[in-house]
Image: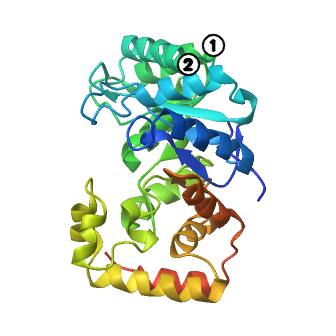
Amino acid sequence: MSERELGRSGLKISPLAFGGNVFGWSADEATTFALLDECVALGINLVDTADVYSAWVDGNQGGESEALIGRWLKRGGRRDRIVIATKVAKWSKHPGLSPANIQAAAEDSLRRLQTDVIDLYQAHEDDPTVPLEDTLGAFSRLIEQGKVRAIGASNYSAPRLAEALAVAQRHNLPRYETLQPEYNLYDRAGYEDALEPLVREHGLGVISYYSLASGFLSGKYRTEADAGRSAARGAQVVKQYLNARGKRILAALDDVASRQAATVAQVALAWLIARPGITAPIVSATSIPQLRELAAARTLLLSKSDIAALDAASAGS
């Protein structure tokens, strides 16, 4: 369960990251603090959040997740034991990747997080209206100011990521050291076809989101009736994933889980962890037992035949 380096940033993280999108949404303050304490205890050291989390909740405005992490740190959370990753660009209060917006958003995130430095600051999405040289220049100034350690990109296409890397090299600017793409055993083509060769060529770290396909790869959505298990997204998950290919993937996961004496979710995560080029899948949990279950995936070693069976079941689109 050795740590892995995020690109060439010097940041070392465990092979599983925690997604702070649940903080201020499905995890209240007490639960958030307990989950963060447990992450430290388990050695899960990267906590990924964003300034926009969780603006989609009635009564929220955004910034809630960062603020909860900040209050946890102030209460005595171990800042030296966690790597804080947050993002800019998607929040209506700080939209896009203009230099002025990046600087203002970073200052606000630092205040909410109650810390002096953001370990990994990520562009939450591409902003084609701003020259990449300007965006990377703004990130460079934050690094020079000691407010950011490394930068990353999320939801970038392969051509734009390649362009950003070329611009960084050409103008001697900090490059994106990480990519945060959607990637899991079901959703493969979007990452594998063009992004995977690019990040492996350049040695970028990859922290993938939707690692369990919104819960489908945990095995809890197997019939139309299961849609009711999650008022938030159950129906959408069933509609998107519960098809012939999805059922084939679940059957393969069931088979490997039975042989490995593991849960379906643990096998799905272990497949990601074993994937060349993946640094750490992001997982979210709203209870300590759930977090402990997912954390056990870090030590689950799949055999070559296990991986081959999962690859075959998930082939195609």
Residue 163 position within the rendered picture, expressed as x and y whole percent measured from the top left: 43, 38
Label 1, residues with CA under 10 Å away: few <14, some 14-19, many ≥20: few
Can residue 288 be seen here? The reply is yes
Residue at 36%, 47% (x, y): give it.
Answer: 157
- In the picture, the quarter occupied by the C terminus is bottom left
Residue at position x 42%, y 56% in the image: 210
Q: Position of residue 294 (x, y in %)?
A: 58, 61
Look at label 1 and name its amino acid. Answer: Glu
The residue pinned by badge 2 equals 140
Would you say 154 lies left or right of 304 here?
left
Residue bearing mark 1: 144
Q: Quadrant of residue 12?
A: top right
* Amino acid type of the residue tagged 2 in the rendering: Ser
- Residue at horizontal 59%, vertical 44%? 35
Labelled pair 1, 2 in contact (Cβ < 8 Å):
yes
Q: 129 or 270, which is in the foreground?
A: 270
Left or right, 242 with reference to 33: left
25 left or right, relative to 84: left
Q: Position of residue 8 (x, y in %)?
A: 69, 39
Q: Quadrant of residue 300?
A: bottom right
Q: Quadrant of the N terminus?
A: bottom right
Whether 127 is drawn above or below 146: the answer is below
Marks 1 and 2, how far apart in space? 6 Å
Q: How is the image coloured?
A: rainbow
Describe the element under mark 1 as helix, strand or loop: helix
The residue positioned farthest toward the right in the image shown: 2
Tell me the number on the disc at residue 67.
Answer: none
